[in-house]
Image (cartoon, helix red, strand yellow):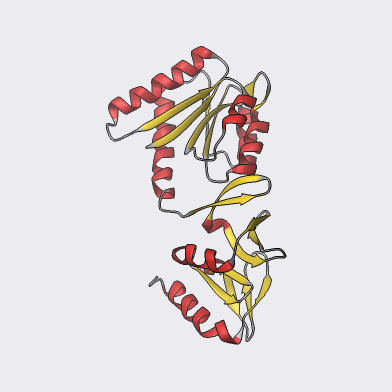
Amino acid sequence: MLKILILEDERPQLDKLAAFLERYRGEVPDFEYHLEAYGSGLDFLNAYQCDADLIFLDIRVPDMLGMDVVRRVRQMDEAVMIVFVTSLTQYAVDGYSVRAFDYILKPVCYASFSAKLERALRMLSHRKQEQMLELRAKSGVRRVPADSVIYVETAARHDLLFHTGGETIRQWGTLSQYEEQLRQAHFARPCSSFLVNLKYVRGVKRDTVILGGTEIEIPLSRAKRKDFLAALAQYKGGSA
């Protein structure tokens, strides 16, 4: 069952979106969802649990700009799918800077809503196969796709650093714990202090692993070399 959130301060608009969801469920029997609706950006953020699948969000709510709400959401949750509902096309375009999935222009009609919803559901179906990480950092719980993590390294005081394309997230734990958890996501350990996403490996030297995008070189130890190269060959060969 999908969890869908609506942030919309105008009650008639909120009721319309809720009615459209029910209408779609009547047309597509296997579409099951739980809906939570909010009329305030602050109420929405205070209640957010990093477990939603899809958000329909008005870009303008009285207490704060919808873009600010989404930026706060993205600090906690990189995975949730966001669809803006707006009468202002310039805000809809700006939404892509916070990785909004799509937008719907007001006044919302069912044909447009159902088409966007169907497209979102296809993407969500694909995403369900992806592994997600819930990182309990000091700033709170973060939900991050494992595929977006380039590498993990040990830090001081039993902390780990999860490096994504845009940021580094500090999390308490051990590499051994995440090595087992991320095995199915094609991570491998080149040495005692690092765990690498094989998707981002661009080359291997005698004693280093080169990661694409960052061009970072990770140590490759003699003890881990054979197993790491075997895992990399299996991944590159597509047999994993």
Observer-nearest of 88 and 207: 207
Residue 234: percent from left, percent from top = 43, 76
Question: Is 110 left or right of 132, judged from the image as shown?
Answer: left
Q: Residue 68's quadrant in the figure?
A: top right
Residue 185: percent from left, percent from top = 47, 63
Q: Residue furthest front?
A: 157
Q: Residue furthest right?
A: 156
Residue 165: percent from left, percent from top = 64, 57
Vertical comparison of 96 with 153: above or below: above
Vertical comparison of 67 with 15: above or below: below
Residue 181: percent from left, percent from top = 48, 62
At 56% from the left and 74% from the top, the residue drawn is: 189
Observer-nearest of 93 and 160: 160
User: Which quadrant is the C terminus positioned in?
Assistant: bottom left
Question: Is 128 left or right of 69, judged from the image as shown?
Answer: left
At 64% from the left and 28% from the top, the residue drawn is: 66
